[in-house]
Image (cartoon, rainbow, N blue to C red):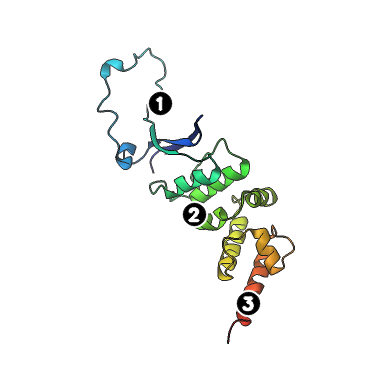
């Protein structure tokens, strides 16, 4: 990565939203996007006069996509997670997210740094993600990420993927779906019971 990468998601009056990119990367953004070089067609006569004031940031902005769907956290994540050149080798990278709910900002920021839980978490309903954030403090805590990782593995092995946690808890007999260690233990016990009751 270079110095910065900025993605803006702007809602349109007619519905849907447009995605704008601005970046200072190791390679020019227009080359990555397959767009013409904006410097080639710049008319020098139209450049602003230098009045001795601080020079404004002239990094080009590109509209790369228009989506005819309501703007939400999942649409933002789908775009960002598919952006191959937006991959961070340093999990301490500084990522700022503005204009979203606290649980959405936490989800976007942490899934960009650690993508392993993306499929599991994006399969949960918004209300569960919001409540998990309120009860646990979000994914910024390593212990929370480990609990979710263990739960995701247990759910996958038990064949309960793509189900809300509340529904999983009811299936396996766990009293509180937001108690991640207890739910994980109940899912593992359920899987063992289901396996032992299988065809012989």
Q: Can residue 89 be seen?
A: yes
Relative to 55, residue 156 above or below: below
Query: Residue at image x 58%, y 44%?
Result: 104
Residue 190 located left or right of residue 54: right
Q: Disc 1 marks which residue? A: 57
Q: Can residue 181 be seen?
A: no
Query: Residue at image x 41%, y 15%?
Result: 53
Q: Disc 3 marks which residue? A: 194
- Residue 68 percent coordinates (x, y): 47, 39
Q: Disc 2 marks which residue? A: 115
Q: Assign the C terminus to one quadrant of the image.
A: bottom right
Query: Callout 3: helix, strand or loop?
Result: helix
- Residue 143 percent coordinates (x, y): 62, 57
Q: Foreground: 128 or 132?
A: 128
Query: Residue at image x 45%, y 37%?
Result: 7
Q: Foreground: 114 or 186?
A: 186
Number of numbered discs present? 3
Residues marked 3 and 1 touching at CB (< 8 Å): no
Q: Assign the N terminus to one quadrant of the image.
A: top left
Query: Callout 1: helix, strand or loop?
Result: loop
* 2 or 1: mark nearer the eye: 2
* 2 or 3: mark nearer the eye: 3
Mark 3 and mark 1: span between their CA atoms?
Answer: 61 Å
Q: Foreground: 56 or 82?
A: 82
Query: Callout 2: helix, strand or loop?
Result: helix
- Residue 43 percent coordinates (x, y): 26, 20
Choose the circle earlier in sequence order: 3 or 1. Answer: 1
Category of crowding for the residue at label 3, using alpha-carbon neighbours closer than 10 angstroms: few (below 14), some (14–19), many (at least 20): few
Q: Foreground: 141 or 82?
A: 82
Choose the circle earlier in sequence order: 2 or 3. Answer: 2
């Amino acid at each position: 990565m270079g110095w910065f990468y900025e993605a803006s998601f702007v809602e349109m009056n007619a519905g849907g939203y447009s995605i704008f990119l601005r970046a200072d990367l190791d390679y020019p953004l227009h080359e990555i996007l397959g767009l013409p070089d904006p410097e080639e067609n710049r008319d020098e006569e139209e450049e602003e006069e230098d009045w001795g004031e601080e020079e404004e940031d002239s990094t080009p902005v590109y509209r790369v996509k228009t989506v005819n769907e309501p703007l939400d956290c999942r649409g933002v994540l789908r775009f960002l997670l598919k952006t191959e050149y937006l991959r961070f080798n340093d999990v301490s990278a500084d990522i700022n997210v503005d204009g979203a709910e606290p649980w959405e900002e936490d989800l976007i920021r942490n899934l960009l740094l650690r993508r392993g839980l993306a499929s599991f978490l994006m399969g949960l309903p918004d209300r569960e993600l919001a409540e998990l954030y309120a009860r646990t403090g979000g994914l910024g805590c390593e212990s929370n990420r480990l609990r979710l990782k263990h739960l995701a593995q247990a759910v996958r092995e038990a064949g309960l993927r793509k189900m809300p946690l509340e529904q999983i808890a009811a299936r396996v007999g766990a009293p509180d779906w937001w108690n991640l260690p207890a739910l994980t233990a109940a899912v593992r016990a359920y899987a063992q019971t289901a396996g032992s009751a299988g065809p012989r």
